[in-house]
Image: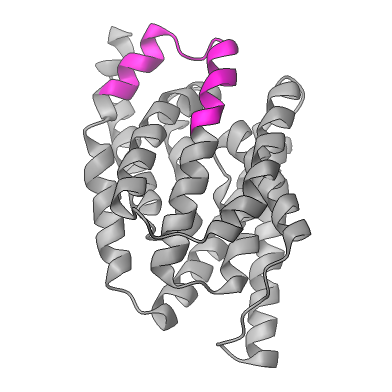
């Protein structure tokens, strides 16, 4: 434990990771929060990085839900949460079989196709085109988000594949995502504990990084409140595109 906390490279990787995840939790940058585990994995095993980050995510979720209190889309949550619960269960059952590289490759491919489809629709229907809510699609993408969130904390891209095309007000989208991932991460605590991921080393590292969580989350929400939809959505799609390329790269590199 003392070795990890006295290693300057741990802080060099973990502090930027927590700050970026916090900005994403506040609603700024969309799925860019996926970089948390990869950044921390530069100095430790990915599984340990995910375990250290999970309690911090839960604290960020509390701050994010408080920040966006009362601003959310009830139908989207009702349609997506049952699938998320199923996805977490699938992740728990297959924890010994599915590698993080496989998950990153799949999520990256889906996210890239999603962005390319959005670009096509902009040319065909214009920038103001919005999709209609679909309960079946919501359940499917909720399941994918729950599964990928459990395995590698990369539930953001699948969530956005369903949520972004509906074009909610940016504040409503941020509030809805806050509640969705607050519930998802809270549920993940049970299987992570059962799998023995919360030992004294990991929990001590989590507590050392926690002071950064509320500050970065509030900063992300502050930025979103000041962004117009015509700026917010292109920016978010751009970050999803960068996330997709990075996930594909990491997934392919890990499998080769």
Indicate yes or no whether the magenta region holds residue 204: yes
Q: Can residue 93 be seen in this view?
A: yes
**Which quadrant of the figure has residue 59?**
top left
Secondary structure of the magenta portion, mostly? helix
Range of the magenta residues? 186-207
Specify the quadrant that holds the C terminus. top right
Would you place residue 107 above or below residue 208 in this image? below
What's the image's color scheme? one colour
Q: In this view, does 202 lie above or below 104?
A: above
Does residue 198 appear left or right of residue 137 in this picture?
Answer: left
Q: In this orientation, which residue lies closer to the viewer: 189 or 151?
A: 189
| 196 shown above or below 141 | above
Disc tally is: 0
Residue 90, position in %: x, y?
74, 30
Position in image of residue 117 (x %, y %): 70, 75
Residue 56 % position (x, y): 36, 31
- The residue positioned 51% from the left and 71% from the top of the image is 168
Q: Can residue 254 be seen in this view?
A: no
Taking the image as shown, residue 49 lies to the left or right of residue 60, namely: right
Q: Viewer-proximal residue, 117 or 12?
A: 117
Judge left or right: residue 74 versus residue 142.
left
Vertical position of residue 8 compared to residue 241: above or below = above
In magenta stretch: residue 71: no
Q: In the rendered image, which quarter is residue 164 located in? A: bottom right
Q: Residue at x 54, y 10 (%)?
A: 196
Residue at 47%, 31% in the rendered image: 41
Left or right placement of residue 235 versus residue 221 in this view: right
**Residue 137: percent from left, percent from top:** 75, 59
Q: Which residue lies at the image location 75% right of the left edge and 22% below the top edge?
A: 93
User: If the image is split into quadrants, where does the N terminus sit?
Assistant: top left
Give the quadrant of residue 243: bottom right
């Amino acid at each position: 434990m003392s070795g990890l906390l006295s290693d300057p490279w741990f802080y060099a990787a973990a502090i930027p990771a927590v700050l970026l995840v916090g900005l994403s939790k506040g609603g700024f940058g969309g799925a860019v929060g996926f970089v948390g585990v990869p950044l921390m994995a530069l100095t430790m095993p990915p599984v340990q990085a995910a375990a250290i980050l999970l309690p911090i995510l839960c604290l960020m979720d509390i701050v994010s839900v408080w920040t966006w209190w009362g601003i959310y889309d009830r139908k989207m949550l009702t349609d997506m949460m049952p699938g998320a619960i199923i996805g977490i269960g699938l992740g728990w059952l297959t924890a010994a079989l599915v590698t993080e590289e496989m998950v990153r490759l799949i999520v990256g491919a889906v996210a890239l196709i999603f962005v390319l489809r959005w670009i096509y629709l902009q040319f065909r229907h214009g920038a103001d085109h919005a999709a209609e809510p679909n309960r079946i699609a919501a359940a499917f993408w909720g399941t994918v988000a729950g599964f990928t969130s459990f395995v590698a904390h990369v539930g953001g891209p699948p969530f956005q594949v369903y949520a972004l095309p509906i074009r909610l007000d940016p504040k409503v989208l941020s509030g809805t995502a806050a509640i969705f991932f607050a519930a998802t991460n809270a549920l993940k605590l049970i299987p992570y504990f059962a799998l023995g991921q919360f030992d004294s080393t990991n929990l001590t590292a989590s507590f050392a990084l926690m002071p950064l969580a509320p500050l970065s989350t509030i900063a992300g929400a502050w930025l979103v409140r000041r962004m117009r939809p015509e700026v917010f959505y292109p920016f978010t799609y751009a970050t999803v595109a960068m996330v997709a390329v990075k996930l594909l790269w990491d997934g392919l590199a890990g499998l080769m």
